[in-house]
């Protein structure tokens, strides 16, 4: 984790620390920009300990401060290192850091001893720990998470960078230090383990997909066990497909470094895999297993997308599909109800970045607008109505006549059609046309053009003409009756309501609850989650369109949230009027 020596612990630092803890990852901290004005080593250490507790231990001290910062003192080795023009030289430890050196050294040696029973016995018996003891003990403590060592430096001047890289090599776990990874045998609950060794059967997890307009799809994966060679076949256990591996390569910035083979611990890439997606497991076909896929956060911010230029619809479709393959937190869907293409991501900035990439990579400019909501229409009352379609214009005419009863359904069903015709007042062959006429009106709605739900229609009576009656005539008669009855049966508009879970520091909880109440939300409860609080609520979806932006400003970026559809509820009368009016205006345009 890189921490700014001027700003201290920021939102991203807290979130990354929390994710690392959730995944049980070892951590090293690098305090950067110690050469800047107002940079403070002591304040940043205090800030880190306040935020993350007693696991934070500096293993370097700065030589000089702000503009005169020129090197570091290694607390464990009692050595000073000076940096100039990218080169590192060893020198004298300055006298003004000796007191701090002694305090911090005693602190970290005690922490190292506590992480290992043998070293603790040695330490308690008053025996000095050797340099080898300290190095081995620190590595164990970093791997088990009881110490997060702090390195320091100034990246632009290359001060401390070499020491940091040495620390990463010496103290962070290698693939061989990680426990055997568990996977499931495809199609069963049987668990298999894979050790991170080159002589184990091959297995790898795909963690990223890149959409390149020239090369096509580039798949990146981490090899957890075994060895993989170029120009071989592998089995995608997640999708039960065999994939042909062409050239293997390491990605180094924009460069692709070709390799003949790679083994456990390597991160490699391959182009043009047809079926494989992010989160899939690639294995040896003789020893298949499926690793638990990566859990990506669910998108929380949605916008509708339309091309600025006519004729770009196909390019938008293929471009968005390619980008969604690349980024699992970005979802594209075509909403038939509202006739919009809607994209969802982690926030406004995420969607802006996607729009820029669409333009840069695929040459398509788009407009982003707030998506229309999928409202529903229903009734609260009952109506008894008739519909008659009669047309005579020379030759064969049209005649259809139905009497129907409409009522609200309280059992949660969408629609029920009941046939209560006796004595053939509506011939059997025309009854399906009556139901079809009703269903067609329900799709487009009556009030504001939204689908109708929760209605029971009972066909009671009608009449027919032996020559002029037809399926079309009865379909039209049924639609006329439905529209008339719907308006007589106390019609209402329904809006989607979502379950919201907001994860925030306790200090912001009052603001978040107050804001959700203003959004017509119902607070369902609160519960602690480590140092954070989870606020659970149900809120109308229409109020949540810009919530990602609202929450960020309310919580200084420290809050996160998830949304999931819950149910439909009646829209308050005043709001319903404006929605219906808006829908009618759109229809006229």
Image (spheres, rainbow, N blue to C red):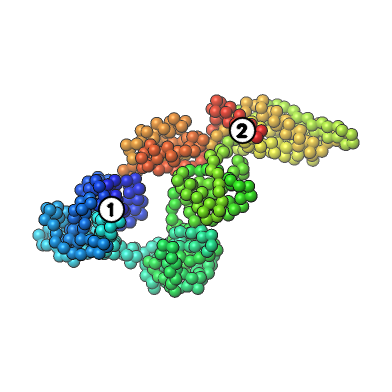
Give coordinates of residue 225: x percent, y percent.
40, 68
- Is 471 on the left-hand or right-hand side of 49? right
Residue shown at 72% from the left, 30% from the top: 481
Could you say which quadrant of the image residue 150 lies in?
bottom left
Q: Is residue 477 above or below residue 48?
A: above
Give coordinates of residue 177: x percent, y percent.
31, 64
Image marks 1 and 2: residues in contact by CB distance under 8 Å = no
Residue shown at 44% from the left, 67% from the top: 256
> What residue is shown with label 1?
32
Give coordinates of residue 511: x percent, y percent.
37, 33
Residue shown at 41% from the left, 71% from the top: 262
Distance of mark 1 from mark 2, alpha carbons? 55 Å
**Viewer-side label of 1, 2:** 1
> Is 510 or 152 nearer to us in this picture?
152
Q: Quadrant of the C terminus?
A: top right
- Is 587 on the left-hand or right-hand side of 216? right
Q: Is residue 570 visible?
A: yes
Give coordinates of residue 207: x percent, y percent.
44, 59
Please, what secondary structure does the residue beneath circle 1 have?
strand
Q: Residues within 10 Å of mark 1 (few under 14, many from 20)?
A: many
Which label belongs to residue 490? none
> What residue is shown with label 2?
583
Residue shown at 47% from the left, 42% from the top: 563
Q: Residues within 10 Å of mark 2 (few under 14, many from 20)?
A: some
> Is 433 or 224 nearer to us in this picture?
224
Please, what secondary structure does the residue beneath circle 2 have?
helix
- Is 442 on the left-hand or right-hand side of 412? right
Q: Is residue 526 visible?
A: no
Q: Is residue 372 above or below residue 44?
A: above
């Amino acid at each position: 984790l890189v921490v700014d020596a001027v700003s201290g612990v920021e939102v991203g630092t807290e979130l990354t620390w929390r994710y690392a803890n959730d995944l049980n990852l070892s951590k090293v901290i690098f305090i950067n920009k110690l050469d800047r004005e107002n940079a403070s080593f002591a304040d940043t250490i205090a800030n880190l300990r306040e935020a993350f507790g007693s696991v934070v231990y500096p293993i370097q001290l700065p030589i000089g401060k702000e503009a005169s910062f020129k090197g570091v003192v290694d607390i464990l080795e009692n050595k000073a290192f000076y940096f100039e023009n990218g080169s590192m030289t060893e020198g004298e430890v300055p006298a003004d850091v000796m007191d701090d050196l002694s305090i911090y050294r005693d602190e970290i040696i005690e922490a190292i001893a506590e992480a290992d029973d043998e070293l603790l016995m040695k330490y308690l018996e008053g025996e000095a720990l050797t340099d080898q003891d300290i190095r081995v003990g620190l590595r164990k403590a970093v791997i088990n998470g009881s110490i997060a060592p702090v390195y320091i430096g100034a990246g632009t001047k290359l001060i401390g960078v070499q020491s940091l890289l040495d620390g990463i090599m010496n103290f962070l776990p290698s693939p061989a230090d990680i426990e055997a990874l568990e996977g499931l045998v495809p199609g069963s609950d049987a668990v298999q383990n894979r050790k991170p060794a080159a002589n184990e059967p091959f297995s790898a997890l795909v963690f990223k997909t890149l959409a390149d307009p020239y090369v096509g799809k580039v798949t990146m994966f981490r090899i957890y066990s075994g060895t993989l060679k170029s120009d071989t076949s592998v089995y995608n256990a997640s999708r039960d497909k065999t994939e042909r591996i062409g050239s293997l390569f390491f990605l180094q910035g924009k460069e692709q470094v070709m390799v003949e083979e790679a083994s456990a611990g390597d991160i490699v890439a391959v182009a043009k895999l047809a079926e494989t997606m992010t989160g899939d497991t690639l294995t040896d076909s003789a020893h298949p297993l499926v690793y638990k896929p990566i859990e990506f956060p669910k998108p929380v911010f949605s916008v509708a997308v339309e091309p600025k230029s006519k004729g770009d619809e196909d390019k938008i479709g293929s471009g968005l599909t390619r980008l969604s393959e690349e980024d699992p937190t970005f979802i594209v869907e075509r909403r038939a109800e509202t006739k919009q293409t809607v994209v969802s991501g982690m926030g406004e900035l995420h969607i802006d970045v996607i729009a820029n990439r669409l333009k840069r990579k695929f040459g398509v400019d788009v407009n982003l607008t707030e998506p229309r909501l999928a409202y529903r229409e229903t009734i609260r009352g009952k109506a008894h109505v008739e519909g008659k379609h009669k047309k005579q214009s020379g030759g064969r005419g049209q005649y259809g006549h139905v009497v129907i009863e409409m009522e609200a359904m309280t059992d949660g069903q969408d629609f029920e059609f009941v046939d209560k015709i006796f004595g053939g007042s509506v011939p059997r062959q025309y009854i399906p046309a009556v139901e079809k006429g009703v269903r067609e009106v329900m799709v487009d709605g009556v009030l504001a053009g939204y689908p109708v739900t929760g209605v029971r229609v009972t066909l009671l009576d009608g009449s027919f003409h032996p020559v002029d009656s037809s399926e079309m005539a009865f379909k039209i008669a049924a639609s006329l009756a439905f529209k008339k009855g719907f308006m007589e049966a106390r019609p209402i508009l329904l809006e989607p309501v979502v379950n919201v879970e907001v994860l925030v520091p306790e200090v912001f909880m009052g603001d978040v609850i107050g804001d959700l109440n203003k959004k017509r939300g119902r607070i369902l409860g609160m519960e602690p989650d480590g140092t954070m609080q989870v606020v659970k609520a149900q809120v109308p979806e229409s109020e949540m369109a810009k919530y990602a932006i609202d929450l960020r400003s309310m919580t200084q970026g420290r809050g996160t949230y998830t949304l999931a559809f819950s149910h439909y509820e009646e829209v308050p009368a005043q709001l319903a009027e404006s929605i219906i009016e808006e829908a009618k205006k759109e229809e006229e345009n």
